[in-house]
Structures are given as structure tokens and as C-alpha cells.
Image (cartoon, rainbow, N blue to C red):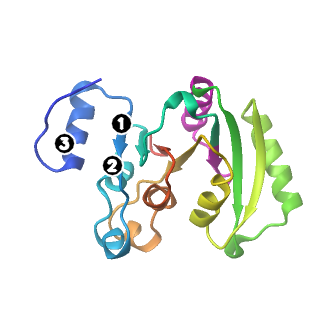
Amino acid sequence: MHVGVETGSVKEGIGKLIEKKKVDLVVMGTHGASGIKEYTLGSNTEKIVRSCKVPVIAIKKNVKATTINNIVYPTNLTITNKNLLTSIKELQMLLKARLHILYVNVPSRFTPDHATEKRLIEFARVNQFKNCSIHIYNDLDEESGIINFSSRFKNRMIAMSTHGRRGINHLMTGSIAEDVVNHIDCPIWTYSDKM
């Protein structure tokens, strides 16, 4: 654990610290961002989630790690980053939690539940997930689906990847992970798919 003072912006300070101390996890408190600030500046935590080279846990409320017994893992079933999947399994083992593999079905890319269920079962089998369940949740967009589905569980954490988009690409397409960080009240663990 590192305790100290860094100068500069939060993003630059944490980036320097990660390099200097070989940090492999960042834990940050967050209040989130909303309204115009969310679309123009974003929260400090959102900026770290977007740019960080290591996993980030964002926490809005005081939570003891020992009480987390449900991990919601949203996926679009196209994830091929084996490091991400291995890290999620390690997180699950560390917390001794049940893993809820979630596919949010949205109108813009609707698929029948029976077809999605087959893909989810195969995804869990191929990646050798244990102590897990699969879920299909229908909502208007991915962010709402993740937030609404995860609210079913007490003592939960969300684990998801982020694309780390920047510049015009970020402005045009945004980031589901960053949006969830701003609007969820449970801990969220993010992992850049560029790691």
C-alpha cells in the first residue's frame, strides 16, 4: 500500500505512482458525475477508469470486502481477453462470491433469449467459470440494464471491462463502464481490455 502526496492532476499523479511503485490495483472513492459535468469533464474516478493501465475499484459507499458475496459480470459475449477473464475468476475466489454472468439485451441489437442463453452457457463452459449463473436482462440500454439488474442483489460488486476510449471516439461512443461508475452505488471493478 502506498501513502503519500503526489502533485499535478489526479490522473497524472496516479499514472506516475502506478509506474513508480509498480502498482497493480487502484482503489478510489467516488461521488460520480452528473448533468453537464458528466458530459464535459467527467469525475476523477471516471478519468482514471478510462486511462488506467491496472484494474480500478471505484467505491461510492463504505463497504467491507468480506461482505461482498455477489459479483455481476456484464458481457456482450465478444470478450477474448483471457487476462480479464482470469482476473475475474481470481476476484471471485478472493471474495468467495457467486458470479452472475449478465447479458443485457437492448433494442438496437436484440437477440432471442433462447439463442443468447445457448451462447451464455457455452461462454461459461469454455471459460470454466465456477459458482456462477447466467442471466439475460432486457432494457433500453446497457448501462440501465446493468444498474437495474445488479440492484436485485445485496452485498454486490460489478466487474466489467472498459475500452479506454479517448478523444473524439470517447465523445461519440462513450463508455458503458464509465457511465456505470458515475451512476451505481455499489463497488465497481474495472479492467481495461487493453491490458
The residue depicted at 55 percent of the width and 37 percent of the height is 84
| Residue at image location 71% in from the left, 75% down from the top | 107
- The image quadrant of residue 1 is top left
Cα distance in 3D space between marks 1 and 3: 12 Å
In the image, residue 116 sits, relative to residue 8, either above or below, namely below
Tell me if residue 76 is in the magenta stretch. Answer: yes
* Kind of residue at disc 3: Gly
Location of residue 122 in the rendering, given as x and y in whole percent from the top left corner: 81, 43
Front position in the image: 47 or 32:
32
How packed mark 1 is, by other alpha carbons closer than 10 Å (few <14, some 14-19, many 20 or more), is some
Pinpoint residue 182: horizontal percent, then vertical percent. 43, 59
Decide which of tag 3 and tag 2 comes sooner along the chain.
3
Label 3 sits on residue? 13
In this image, 73 relative to 113: left or right?
Answer: left
Q: Against 28, is 47 above or below?
A: below
| Residue under pointer 1 | 26
Q: Which residues are magenta?
A: 72-94
**Outermost residue to the left:** 7
Earlier in the chain: of badge 1 and badge 3, it is 3
Cα separation between marks 2 and 1: 9 Å
Quick check: 145 left or right of 51? Answer: right
Query: Disc 2 or 1, which lies upstream in sequence?
Result: 1
Circle count: 3
